[in-house]
Image (tube, rainbow, N blue to C red):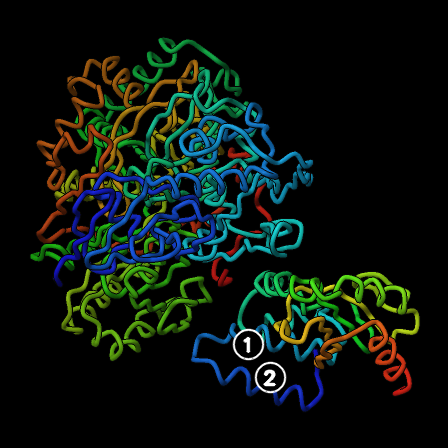
Amino acid sequence: MSEMVNLTVDGKAIQAAPGTLLINAAKQAGIEIPAFCYYDGLSLQAACRMCLVEVEKTPKLQVGCTLPVAEGMVVHTDSPTVRASRKGMLEFLLTNHPLDCPVCDKGGECELQDMTFRYGAGESRFLEEKVHVDEQQWSPVVYFDAPRCILCYRCVRVCNEGMGVNALGVINRGVNAEIAPNEYDHLNCDECGMCIDICPVGALTSGAYRYKTRPWEMEHVGTICTHCSNGCKTTLGVRGEQIVRGNNRDRSGINGEFLCVKGRYAFDFTHHADRLQSPMIRKNGRLEPVSWSEALALVAKKWREIVERGGRFGVIGSTRTTNEENFFLQKFARQVLGTNNIDHHRSGDIPTLLDALSGRTGALATTADLYNEKAVLVVASDLSQEQPFLAWQVRANVRHHGAHVYTATPGPVREDRTAVRSVRCEPGREIEAVESLGDALRAEPSLVVVFGDAIKGEALRRLVAFGDSLGIPVKYVALLDYSNSRGALDMGLLPDLGPGYHPVAAPGMTMAGMLADASLDALWVVGANPLSRTPLASPDAFVVVQDLFLTETAERASVVFPAASAYEKSGTVTNVCGEVQRLKPAVKIAGTKTDLEIVGLLAKELGAQLGVWLPDNVFEEIRATVRGYNVPLPVLATGGSAITAALNGRVKSAPGPELIQSARNTLFTSGSLGRYCRTLQSVLEAPGALYQGK
Amino acid sequence: MTFSPELEARFEKLLKIYPEGRQRSAVVPMLMYAQDEVGSVTRELVEEVARRCGVNPLQVDEVVGYYSMLHTKPLGKHHVQVCTNISCLLVGGEELYEHAKKTLGVGNKEVTADGLFSLEEVECMGACSWAPAIQVNYDFYHHVTPEKLDKLIQDLRKLQ
């Protein structure tokens, strides 16, 4: 490390690394230099002039957000000149800014309000009429109110640099300058809402949230997004038992402030009119609402009969339920129903990856590694569409660290634009494409390989062998579909592997096997919709379904239990990189119960001793028994992410790569759940097909 | 969109003079030269320049909106630009501009009916030492008086 630079800020002697910007050096010393346009992680703009400070021996005020520290620099951030300059800047910003704060969504959490309160003048000298421009709607979720805009360019930069979408720009100049969308009068973009989130004022507002509440009337519940596998933290704004907003303004969680359209808006399924709110039993061919006790008793009676006559059970778990629920479910299936016929919708070959990497540590990449490692290779995935947060990490890595990106995909992807090499491959020939990059990759100091579901079984072993041949440290991420796809695997929702990938003595049937088994006596589906893809062969199977909605699978059920969603429960989920995070309930939907409670009540009904079915108790058992999950509780309790130390030995799993199939969700789809997210449906401008390079 | 061979050659050169990956630097000169040939910056031109420089049309729109010498509507054959910024203003720039309006019979950014002249009130063009100054297309005229302006307009008319 080169020597530290000594400087004085407001009489305080401070040290900073060479190249540190004055605004950050002051911040480290506890001195605030106010700014609108400066934004950590984005390019410098120096547009707002709020950060002007006095630097001795320079004749004019200096821009604190672009000025690197220098040896012997003496800075005054609170001199009369600086104070007057800030007052003047705010007076300018407010010349055309409407003072509609009482009805502005941003009121109460507006940076312009805060700055004016702190640094502004008490009165304005402008008597002229304010310029008014009508509000514009750019998409179902993005509204723009030009007069409120202070032209800090944050939205433009986060869209261009952060998202790589380039949907926003600034047209015209001077007083006429304004933010403009890419399709002249509307947006064609990811609809991620990053621009709204980052706006310091109320110029960009959210169609989902606007005029619903005042910010201080909400409770803020930090939980984990229930959609894709990336495990972003979303802070849900709850007002009166209704979720009205999702954001992550406090930058907590692995995703910092990042959220895609799903994390930010796709919480509206919680209050969808079709939510199931009562158990149902099929009577005379129709599902009729009944009491919990009636439904539980019927299931217990049927299952007891089937167990007693040695009938065949099939259990299908969920990729969205918590680790606790998955663990408890497999325990129930294996101990009470006495079956290993348990499976879930698999979307990535984690068992083979763990087996191929056995004996080494640090070979599984974390989400942070995608931001920190020197090179990233994307194989067979349209990362920006399918894994939005991982793609954000890769873009940030390129921007901040100059990382080298390589892509080997069947079609054009957004990552190509920043890639040093991109190769196209026919589906099924991905490994050949990867191998053609060998010489370039060998020259990299380290590499993270992220790969889609095409890389499984032998192909995956070949990929790891290729990684070994490079002679550099290589880490891997096997991409998965849903918020707890990883947890479903780790918790042993597999016919041949129990929790922690321990092989079971007598492997059971796979999901495909269960559905095709004409003599299956009972099927129990928890939070999944397998019958939307494959019919159930057994005509007389007693089907029990726990779900939020009457899906294709629930419609075939004999008994349906109304389940609570991830936003309505406690517990933990594990993301694609094996990072465990904790859910917090934001709302309660009347009539529903969490899957853990439903399974627990069924256990009670059957007189089974499976232990207390509270999330904390079950997680204690997971920590004690599932390898890799002995994670520090305080980290989880404080809303952090704990990295599971993955299994480090051989995994003896039955081959079955054909069972692994990603649902190929885009930004605007999320399996069966996505159909009940009105916002996702409304912003679906294009079909959102993969591999279009957008 | 196709251009004259001369302009195509110029574009080709422009795209080569900037470092690899910085081809968007060519947006401003390409728009300038193309505007002279096409007559104005049309929608089609914006999209063409965007395509050639590897940016999206919005990024070209940002440039078009920012630079006052780029025009989205056709100008007259002779585009008369009168400076009314401080130095020129002090020595009669405003009067000159008023006079030009009267002589040409058009207002700011308007074109005469015959399409020969257009008028624009512009900010400082860096000719303060010879104020008041005007610019017609790319040519500067110094120490301009209303009489000199009338003479210039007559001469330009005679050129036809």
On the rendered structure, is A211 left or right of B68? left
- In the image shown, does A145 or A228 lie closer to the viewer? A145
**Mark 2, secondary structure of its residue:** helix
Mark 2 is surrounded, within 10 Å at the Cα level, by few (under 14), some (14 to 19) or many (20 or more) other residues, namely: many
Q: Quadrant of residue B122?
A: bottom right
Q: CA distance from mark 2 to mark 1?
A: 8 Å
Taking A378 as reference, is A207 above or below it?
above
User: Residue B26: which disc?
Assistant: 1
Taking A395 as reference, is B131 above or below it?
below
The picture places residue B90, in percent across and down from the top left corner, at 69, 63
Q: Quadrant of residue A434?
A: bottom left
Chain letter for the residue marked with disc 1 in the picture:
B
Type of amino acid at the residue the image marks with label 1: Ala
Chain letter for the residue marked with disc 2 in the picture:
B
- In the image shown, does A361 or A49 lie closer to the viewer? A49
Q: Are marks 2 and 1 in contact (CB under 8 Å)?
A: yes
**Mark 1, secondary structure of its residue:** helix
Q: Residue at x 58, y 25 (%)?
A: A103
User: Residue A479: which disc?
Assistant: none
Q: Earlier in the sequence, mark 2 or mark 1?
A: 2
Q: Residue at x 39, y 67 (%)?
A: A418
The picture places residue A471, in percent across and down from the top left corner, at 14, 73
The N terminus of chain A sits in image quarter: bottom left
- The residue lying furthest to the front in this view is B91
Type of amino acid at the residue the image marks with label 2: Phe
Q: Which residue is mark 2?
A: B11
The picture places residue A291, in percent across and down from the top left corner, at 41, 9
Does residue A321 appear in this view? yes
The picture places residue A199, in percent across and down from the top left corner, at 48, 41
On the rendered structure, is A332 left or right of B2? left
